[in-house]
Amino acid sequence: MAKTGPSNSQLLSWALPCLPYAAIGLPLAVYLPHYYATYIGVDLGVVGSVFLAVRSIDIFFDPIVGWGMDRTRNRFGPYRTWITLGTPILAAAIWMIFMAARGVGRDYLFQWLLVLYLGFSITTLAQLAWGAVLAPQYDQRSRLYGWWQAFNILGVLIALFIPVAVDKLKLGDYGAGVRAMGWFIVVALPLTLLVNLLAVPEPRNVSARPHGALKAWVALFLRPTVRKVLWCDLFLGLAPGLTGTLLFFYFQSIKGFDQSQSQVFMAIYFVAGLLFAPFWSWLAMKLGKDRALQIASVVFAVFYAAVAFIPAGNFEIAAGALFLAGVPYAAGLLLTRAMMADVADEVRLDTGEDRMGLLFSFLSLTTKLGYAISVGSLVILEWSGFQEKLGRANPETAQWTLQALFIVLPTLLLLASAFVLQRYPLSPARHAEIRAELEARDAAA
């Protein structure tokens, strides 16, 4: 592929499925635990336990799916094949989860969440790996995953505004708003996939079929570049995961805002992330991906910690603080994905095997593990004696627990993500050497 990289129209087409994927991610992290606990009628502790159990199982899906992608060889292309297979699985599970009737229990939630996560693993992994072969050069990947993250945030905003629109237009209650999100996802999944398949090429890497020996998988984890990216991604998944899981509880029970105001704060947070996503792509091209991500993590920690000092009930200051906290939000997922694509090139040069799918599955594993742990915070919150209906009248122990989980722990995790990237070995110059060697070898094959 030419070094100019994919066109804007190709990037647009490739990024379109992020709209429904991200619209799934927001409810999974924010709405669905709250929805099943307060509207459907499942006990809060049971909801937290089920989400934690399903996400703990789901982390084993990703390496298996990634391994299967790396071994798939056909004319259609491995990533096009897998994303096509995963879409109907995901759509069916979305329908069952979002359209659930009041009174369904633990088993129903567990079974369909498991199917949902399987479909989600297949489709999102295929899209991520497809992007890495679509844009093979160092700076191209910062640009490509900048598009990816921008469309992810746009999808989050769509999902966020759907229940607000349902409420403001008096089209139904809280449950109707959640079901409307489900309708959007079910319709958007096949439509965006069709555009994806018709408009985006899938370049092929020249490589041997990878073997599946356990020692080969262990060898990947032992690479310094892989370990650093995975630790960073784990911390950057857990920190926003805690934010999403606990945001409504924090702003209603600690700061005294109502649910509609809390939804506005979340929208402001994601709008800031969308607006500044191109900046982090630009900074990565100027300084390198690892340096840009370190800067973003420290900025994120500082702005996020400042949220604790918002005066209770002051909407304007809270809105400004949430905007600042959202400025570095896009950098984490954007840059870790771009960095892992570079690592996959390093692995292919050293081993002769294309491990793109497997490496991205490791990255999905750490992200999901972070979000799984964050949902487990609901269990800790219940143990502390917290009850949503009490609001600011919750016991002092419960309020301190909520503040520690929502403010202190994410801030420390964000600083840790910057720390682990010290002495990151895969510089732009080193990656340019790797790409030159790969292209020379592929040309000779």
Image (cartoon, rainbow, N blue to C red):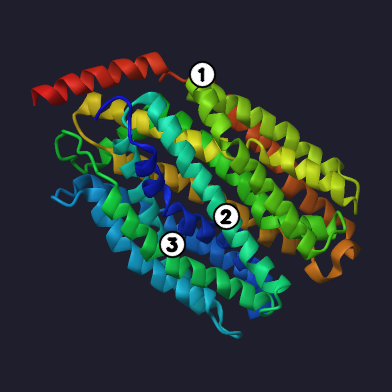
Question: Mark 1: which secondary structure?
Answer: helix
Q: Please determine whether, in this image, residue 134 is positioned above or below residue 350.
A: below
Please state which of the two labelled residues, at mark 1 or mark 3, is closer to the viewer: 1
Q: Amino acid at mark 1?
A: Lys
Name the residue nearer the viewer: 251 or 285: 285
Decide if residue 10 is on the left or right side of residue 281: left
Which residue sits at x=43%, y=71%? 93
The quarter of the image holding the N terminus is top left
Q: Please determine whether, in this image, residue 62 is positioned above or below residue 226.
A: below
**Badge 2, how many Cα within 10 Å: few under 14, some, many 20+?**
many
Q: Amino acid at mark 3?
A: Tyr
The quadrant where residue 136 appears: top left
Find disc 2 in the rendering and name its residue.
156
The quarter of the image holding the C terminus is top left
The Cα atoms of the two marked residues, 1 and 3, are separated by 36 Å
Instruction: Identify the mark at residue 286; answer none if there is no mark.
Output: 1
Find disc 3 in the rendering and name its residue.
117
Q: Please determine whether, in this image, residue 245 is positioned above or below residue 220.
A: below
Question: Mark 2: which secondary structure?
Answer: helix
